[in-house]
Image (cartoon, coloured by chain):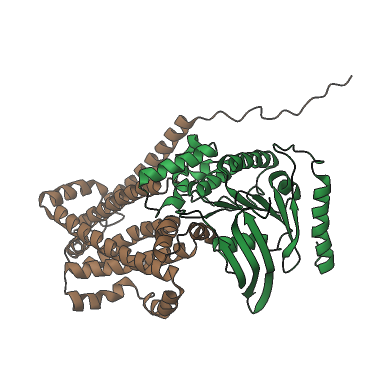
Chain colours: A brown, B green
Amino acid sequence: MTDITLPAGPTAAPPARPVLDGLRQVGLAAAGLSLFILVWEALPRIGLINSMLLPAPSVIPAAFWAEIQSGAWASAVSASLGHYTIGLAVGAVLGLVGGVATGMSQLAEDMTSWVVRVLRPIPGLAWVPFAIIWFGVSQSAAVFIIAIGVFWIVFFAAHGAIRGVDRDLIEVADAFGFRSARERLFKILLPAAMPGILVGLRTALGQAWMAVVAAEIFGVPGLGQRMIQASSLLATELVVVYMLTMAALYGLLDTVFVAVQRWVLRWKA
Amino acid sequence: MGAAMESVIDIEGLSLTFERDGQRNEVLRGLDLSVPRGAFIAIVGSSGVGKSTLLRVLIGLARASSGTVRIAPRPGQRQPLAFVFQDSRLLPWRPVIENVAFGLEGSGLTRTERRQKAHEALEIVGLAHLAERWPHQLSGGQRQRVSLARALAVEPEVLLMDEPFSALDAITREALQDELVRIWQVTGKTVLFVTHDIEEATYLADRVVVLAGSPGRVVADQIVDAPRPRRRSQSQEPDLVAGIRQHISGELLLDGTGI
């Protein structure tokens, strides 16, 4: 009789250690961040870089505190959030309407295709002269610049998402007698296109923050204007304060948006 | 199934030609069919013979080129026909109960009434306990039951079923076939059931209508009078099955379309 030895293999999957893995991940992230701040702190300290050009992170909290105490931080943030919210809302609503209309109607798409090709490549900043001529250096001018950037992103996202809706689902509406454009839109097209539309909105959420700075640089009060003022006074630590402020605000908004998005799309596998 | 029975659908001289890229494709020619109220009729034929197209014309998803279709609903009936697709086509963003209630929207019922009716339809297919699930959480058989419930919920006179079980595994398919016969007997609906499976047709239906040829036309119309409940076995209606096969293959040979 011969003994048959089966090749030794893994008898079971290696034990999962989710808690340890999680800790390791947090630890690594913290280590990386600390290293980044250390290098940043060291560069101006050892004189490799002039501290006028790159402020050390240790001076940031004091600058932040002073800016809060003077009230400048709060007023800049609230002004910018105002432009941001209104610009985002205007651009998103118009983009959604335009994208849905051209997505649903071949006539609308054919009529607008060359208008779109002409206007689309013009960057938001190129509209600054017109924004100033039409609205002056005002809140409306900033809103206008922001809305233009948002409009195109949402327009193309909505157009593509509506176009991509499964014809089979539209047939379901037809088979149950829902044949008007309105019924089609609200029962099938919009809910089916929602994932694509939300991706566009999330992109616009980030894009609009960049536009906020661009729109305020020419003098409309807000974060961007404050940054330009600070940089012209070589108050670089203030510039960093506002850079971090923007990062934090964006991070917060994006986190909230993702939570809402997850809830709206909870039907997805 | 005498001629005295009142018919719910009358089709006369139905022809349909698609035109795509300048090419004419005649799918159906001169088709006559009368569907008695309460009947279970299976329409069999090979793929491309126009059997699905026939159902699509009835529900208004395709337009006939000529011929007449008369549908006689009961008085006060809002939607005389309801469609069950081959793939369930549930709306993935709606929970099961809202999918079943879909066809009732715009009927003047309140949301509560719609959900009540949807719930009753789900009970008929035995899935009331899954009312709040999302479609992606269901198995293929469950999805198709929900799709059937969605059709039943509008309380139609006729169920139009387009190869509804062909995408299911054999065990699930047999369970759903028996389920359908039970529902048909309980509700007294008329069923027009399209399939390419001759055994399925003879197991389920009172009457098997065979479409063949290109353009498709009715080449045979057979009564299946095996008593119910029927037994599922190869030898159940051997002559009938063989006869239908011959009709279909004979037409294919005559047309030279091959298989």
Residue A218 visible (yes or no): no
Q: Position of residue A178 (x, y in %)?
A: 45, 60
Q: Where is residue A87 in the image (x, y as percent from the top left)?
A: 26, 64
Of the pair A66 and A76, the residue shown nearer to us: A76
In the image, residue B229 sits, relative to residue A184, either above or below, namely: above
Residue sticking out furthest to the right: A1
- Quarter of the image containing the N terminus of chain A? top right
In the image, residue B245 sits, relative to residue A220, either above or below, namely: above
In the image, residue A216 sits, relative to residue A127, either above or below, namely: above
Of the pair B212 and B169, the residue shown nearer to us: B212
The picture quadrant where one finds residue A52 is: bottom left
Of the pair A64 and B33, the residue shown nearer to us: B33
Q: Image check: A20 left or right of A127?
A: right
Q: Where is residue A185 in the image (x, y as percent from the top left)?
A: 41, 61
Of the pair A265 and A12, the residue shown nearer to us: A265
Q: Image check: A216 left or right of A107?
A: left
Q: Image check: A230 left or right of A32?
A: left
Residue sticking out furthest to the front: B4
Instruction: Identify which residue is drawn at 16% across, 72% down.
Output: A137
Instruction: Identify which residue is drawn at 16% across, 53% down.
Output: A73
Instruction: Identify which residue is drawn at 17% across, 50% down.
Output: A63
Q: Image check: B240 left or right of B178?
A: right
Residue sticking out furthest to the top: A1
Q: How many labels does the image show?
A: 0
Residue B209 visible (yes or no): yes
Q: Position of residue A229 (x, y in %)?
A: 17, 64
The picture quadrant where one finds residue B112 is: top left
In the image, residue B119 sits, relative to residue B193, either above or below, namely: above
Residue sticking out furthest to the left: A70
